[in-house]
């Protein structure tokens, strides 16, 4: 893929014709006239998902009623989908369940890690994450720390959330007080990617456990949790895995920790015998101990449609195309929009970035609204960041060309400079 | 409604013809040949719910994509549905959200109550619930207690879960060490109902806060949380509210506690400004602080179809018919099946029961399977309990007659005594 000034739309059409992943675009139902660069926020509708939902609603719920918990496999859905998802993130069967939300699964993973350290190394009371992490990851760590400290107000043995930032890089922050490190594999805003193998090894070297948030990584970049010897991972299914709006999230726990996995969200679905209706809690002896309550079956069932598409795609090919789309996007923005003040915030090194590309611009919010109005859907993240997801399963090289041409036109014409584009929505 | 031996099917047909709620049956899509006595476990499919889901999937997700968070009101769904649900349980606008699971919402409510007591009355460290409560309610209380005690192993100031049972009735159990009382308004197994007004007053008298689990009450019996001056309530939407399999649950918090509502599941959806992407947590100043993460939109949206049906029904009429159906059921079982050893475990007093009726029988499991095979769908709960939900919106008096006739036939013929009916399913 040439990304020099010689690139033109015709040569990109040739690249599309040679693209081994091009057939996957037909697996999705995408609106006419839209170039969708926000699959990192909400993946598009896989063909067949609406039919799957109709089957769940009309037949399994409507006709089968309560019987479908057994006859339609609802009971097994979290672990059956978990086993499929495990293949995408380098997990084994029985190590992953699909359930709840990413925030809640992060709570479970952090609580479990804290509990293990209470037993193995009780002086370790720091939850280490990064200031630039997705906010919920910081808030959940604060929630755990604050809750535990609330009963221990008199002592100095407090839990603490420590934030990695420019003044406190990972290697300085990771001392022997750290109980658990919680990082996003790919940063939600910048697209920067941690070296999972190296950081996991460093955490273990310091006696810490590690939780990887794969929200912007699962289905986007190759992930090998067991290869990295990680401890926990969580992530969402509605971004690169195309599970549908708000579809339940996942949690992976390394098999070696499962017997010690303990977390306070001890709902009945995590019980060894949920239908024995015992009056005391005994955790299930398998992956079900990561569960809590009853899951939303219709939203759950559609996840499988997205997972099945991802499972058919060769992740190495996905990665090669993701990097090529991003290289092209960066080069075209630089060449075609160079004078309009867009500052690349995504690392250019392939080893250090995920599958989205972000630029900073003081008028980023209005520019994104103007782009959406022209059918190029990206999104905006505070502060000043325009974010573009480059998803190989349904984007072409010519899509990137066309998107940059529209971006250039908006910047050149200043059409973004309108009250309608400055008005803030609830969800940005 | 006569429930004496003079009752026959013809007179029940007349009762059906006079039933002011009979038109509601057409609001549901029920399978042919089924008498559904398990709406207390999973309510049936409201007409229009499949169409609503198809709209969410094909148009809002498929066409609107990420824009639908704003343009289709996804962002407001938890509180908009919460306001509708509030009307059914005696809450005000802005006091209820639909989100997560009952187990998780119970965790939030208990954690908040514990936190308030830590500040107001720190020696109160008992979570009081009942041995016969739905198990998840006990497990979640244990989870909180265990988590808090884990950091405080050296001291004697431990949290404790205390269980009301025959040896420790409420009035003895409710001493001044109790921080919070957590009870199910209607018992999942027996159908017994607490007097919400009296028990709430007794809890407050003892300086405790109270959490009501309305899983088997919301939509089933009149509930007036503000009238009772309760503190918290949680419950599910997939039983009497007919929201669909595993549809998200609800949490209600009395307006007077909202400014102090604090719970450790501090995901970004509970933040004052979730899209400001701040690196520190500030709780929203309204009902959104009960939220945590992103909700499953398709399953959420269908809840509204069920809620709208319930909102149209006069709850006083629902209650009158529920009691009449149950009185009829109890009388017919007593008369028609008296010699087969079914023991009523539901209180006969109207003031003390909800909307389901349960019997105990040593072969309860097999009898329920035989009934299901004959199209009479009830369910089984350990130990030995046959449970029948009597839901006025789609059941008729003749349904009850026909169900009891089939039950009698099964008991008389002993057709339940077959290996196929004894084989245990994962979900009972």
Image: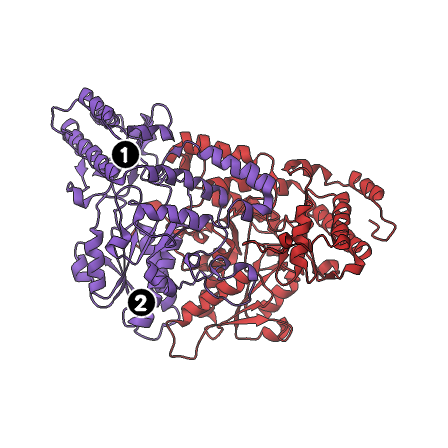
Chain colours: A purple, B red
Q: Nearer the viewer, residue B21 or A32?
A: A32
Determine the residue located farthest toward the right in the rendered image: B6
Q: Chain of mark 2?
A: A
Q: Are marks 2 and 1 on the same chain?
A: yes
Viewport quadrant of the C terminus of chain A: top left
Percent x, y of residue A106 = 36, 55
Describe the element under mark 2 as helix, strand or loop: loop
Who's the residue at 37% across and 79% down the image? B154
| Residue B245 against residue B348 in the figure, above or below | above
Q: Nearer the viewer, residue B312 or A88?
A: A88
Percent x, y of residue A161 = 28, 61
Q: Are marks 2 and 1 in contact (CB under 8 Å)?
A: no
In screen coordinates, is A331 left or right of A255?
left
Q: Chain of mark 1?
A: A
Compare marks 2 and 1 and give the one earlier in the sequence. Answer: 2
The image quarter containing residue B198 is bottom right
Label 2: how many Cα within 10 Å (few below 14, some 14–19, many 20+): many
Determine the residue located farthest toward the front in the rendered image: B419
Who's the residue at 51% across and 58% down the image? B256
Note whether residue A89 is visible: yes
Residue at which label 2 appears: A159
Q: Closer to us: mark 2 or mark 1?
A: 1
Label 1: how many Cα within 10 Å (few below 14, some 14–19, many 20+): many
Q: Which mark is residue A392?
A: 1
| Residue A125 against residue B21 in the figure, above or below | below
């Amino acid at each position: 893929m040439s990304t020099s000034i010689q690139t033109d739309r015709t040569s990109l059409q040739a690249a599309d014709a040679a693209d081994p992943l091009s057939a996957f675009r037909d697996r999705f139902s995408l609106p006419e006239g839209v170039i969708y660069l926000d699959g990192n926020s909400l993946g598009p509708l896989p063909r067949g998902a609406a039919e799957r939902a109709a089957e769940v609603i009309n037949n399994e719920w409507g006709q089968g009623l309560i019987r479908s918990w057994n006859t339609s496999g609802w009971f097994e859905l979290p672990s059956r989908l978990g086993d499929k998802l495990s293949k995408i993130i380098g997990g084994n069967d029985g190590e992953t369940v699909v359930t709840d939300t990413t925030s809640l699964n992060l709570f479970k993973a952090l609580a479990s890690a804290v509990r293990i350290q209470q037993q193995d190394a009780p002086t370790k009371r720091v939850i280490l994450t990064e200031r630039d992490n997705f906010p919920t990851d910081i808030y959940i760590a604060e929630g755990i720390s604050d809750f535990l400290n609330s009963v221990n107000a008199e002592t100095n043995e407090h839990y603490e959330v420590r934030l990695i930032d420019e003044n406190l890089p990972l290697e300085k922050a990771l001392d022997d007080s750290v109980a658990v490190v919680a990082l996003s594999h790919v940063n939600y805003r910048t697209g920067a990617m941690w070296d999972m193998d190296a950081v996991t090894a460093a955490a273990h070297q310091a006696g810490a456990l590690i939780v990887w948030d794969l929200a912007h990584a699962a289905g986007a970049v190759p992930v090998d949790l067991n290869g990295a010897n990680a401890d926990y991972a969580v992530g969402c299914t509605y971004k690169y895995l195309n599970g549908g709006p708000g579809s339940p999230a996942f949690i992976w726990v390394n098999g070696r920790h499962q017997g010690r996995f303990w977390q306070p969200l001890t709902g009945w679905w995590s019980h060894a015998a949920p239908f024995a209706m015992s009056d005391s809690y005994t955790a299930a002896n398998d992956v079900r101990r990561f569960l809590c309550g009853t899951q939303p079956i219709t939203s759950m069932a559609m996840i499988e449609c997205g997972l099945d598409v991802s499972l058919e795609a060769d992740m190495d090919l996905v990665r090669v195309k993701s990097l090529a789309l991003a290289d092209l996007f960066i080069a075209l923005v630089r060449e075609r929009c160079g004078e309009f003040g867009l500052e690349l915030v995504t690392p250019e090194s392939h080893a250090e970035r995920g599958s989205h590309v972000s630029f900073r611009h003081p008028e980023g919010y209005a520019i994104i609204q103007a782009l959406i109005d022209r059918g190029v859907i990206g999104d905006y993240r505070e502060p000043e960041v325009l974010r573009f997801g480059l998803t190989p399963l349904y984007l072409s090289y010519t899509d990137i060309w066309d998107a940059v041409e529209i971006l250039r036109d908006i910047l050149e014409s200043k059409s973004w400079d309108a009250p309608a584009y400055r008005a803030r929505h609830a969800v940005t």
